[in-house]
Image (tube, rainbow, N blue to C red):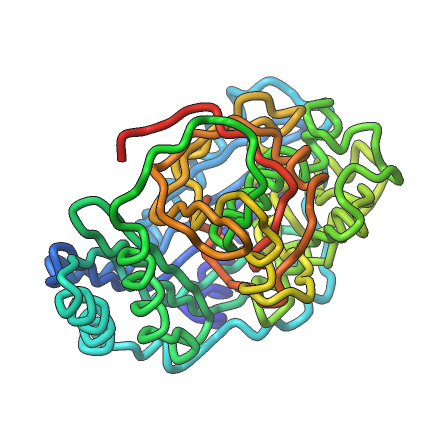
Amino acid sequence: MLGEKGFRKLADQVLSKSKADQTEVLLQAGDSALTRFANSYIHQNVAESDAVVRLRVVIGQRTGVATTNDLSADGLERALETAMLVAGLQPENPNTPPMPAPQPVPLAVAFSEATANASPELRARAAGVFCTLAREKGLTAAGAFRTAIWEMGVANSLGHFVHSAGTVADVNSVIMSDDSSGYSEAAAVDVRHLDVEALAAEAVDKALRSRNPRPLPAGEYPVVLEAYATADIVSIMGYLAFSALAVQEGRSFMAGKFGQPIMSPSVSIWDDGLDPSGLPLPFDFEGAPKKRVDLIQGGVAVGVVHDSATALKDGVASTGHSLPMPNPQGPFPLNLFMAPGTASPEQLIAGLDKGLLVTRFHYTVPVHPAKAVVTGMTRDGTFWVEGGEIAYAVKNLRFTESYLDAFNRVEGIGRETRLLVSRFEIGGVRVPAVRLAGFRFTGTTEF
């Protein structure tokens, strides 16, 4: 960890030597520790410290990038020379946006001393809770507990300078028997906010309930999706559709639909990098300040996120959602939220006469991005519900469904939300459980 003072010294060192028209210094550093357990004992405890500097230079309309984790004066100078060399070999891009000018960046509450000081013993005790409870029930536990400090800074030759640091703690578990499994997961800035006992009980209970699963034919069934499955839907929508580049290229289901209802009126989704109930980050990888962006409001398409390139093309301001520039992905929503409803978990299930309770989705892959069609599997607890009560466990099912169509069939939304690390392993997503009038399952399994 360099700290703000250390990063400023490093950035000044690079910027003073650069002869490019514009130069950007992006620092990503952190200390991460991970404790893994399987077969109900800890088998791995690792820790990593790294600091990577990414240099971007713009010469005329040519851009060059070089990355190094050699932060010595010689290492940084070599990286700068490489970036200059790369820029000279690139074709001109007349759409190259200027780097952000100096501007204020709001503070974000993202740091916890408890997480920063988390010890291997703390993570081991947490793993022990999962393993002990699983053994007591004749099950086996597997999972991982991570605590990390991250640091990020951006400085450019226009005089813009931003630096921030934060923490994240996340835990996940899969509890298994011979023919069943249960799952739990949660994330937080402050490790003390992870209720390990409750998470262990949740996964163990799910593994016990999902024993002796019965086959169920493929078909369309009403479903209750727990927050883990909802998170997959919202995250993939963010990947496929909530980027201005996806709209500009016509591959987003938002394209041409702004101001129109495209989902159930009960669905509202937004991105907010400053919300302390998520995993905050006050600026993006260009150093632009994060702004809250409403994406879906009452089912209506209202906005997408921008970086400097898409903002320049649309004649608007960046919303602070750039990935490291330049990149083919475009802007990305890294702090997604979905509005909760009013239903308790029991009320959501009680609304099913006949249908399925799905714990989570696994190995989901987009099939048709413009229609948000995705295929994947249910996992770690799929149940048949009859008369508003769980009747028995069923074997996992493959689905092929438009997530957009699915969110047009929302019948109920849970009042509780859960914060998870994004499936893309950067940023977070906080979502509730939902009940849908129908969901298309297209294949069966033997497990």
Residue 331 as seen in the image, left or right of residue 113: right
Residue 165 in sight here: yes
Report the number of discs.
Answer: 0
Q: In which quadrant will I find the C terminus? A: top left
Q: Is 318 situated above or below 445?
A: below
Residue 161 in sight here: no
- Residue 102, given in percent of the width and then of the height, sits at 72, 59
Q: Is 276 situated above or below 268?
A: below
Q: Nearer the viewer, residue 359 or 419?
A: 359
Residue at the outermost front position: 387
- Residue 20, given in percent of the width and then of the height, sits at 59, 38
- Residue 156, given in percent of the width and then of the height, sits at 60, 52
Q: Nearer the viewer, residue 409 or 109?
A: 409
Q: Residue at x 57, y 75 (%)?
A: 109
Choose top left, top right, bottom left or bottom right for residue 188. bottom left
Residue at the outermost right position: 259
Q: Is 90 situated above or below 387?
A: above
Q: Residue at x 38, y 67 (%)?
A: 169
Q: Residue at x 54, y 63 (%)?
A: 345
Choose top left, top right, bottom left or bottom right for residue 406. top right
Q: Residue at x 60, y 18 (%)?
A: 91
- Residue 300, given in percent of the width and then of the height, sits at 82, 44
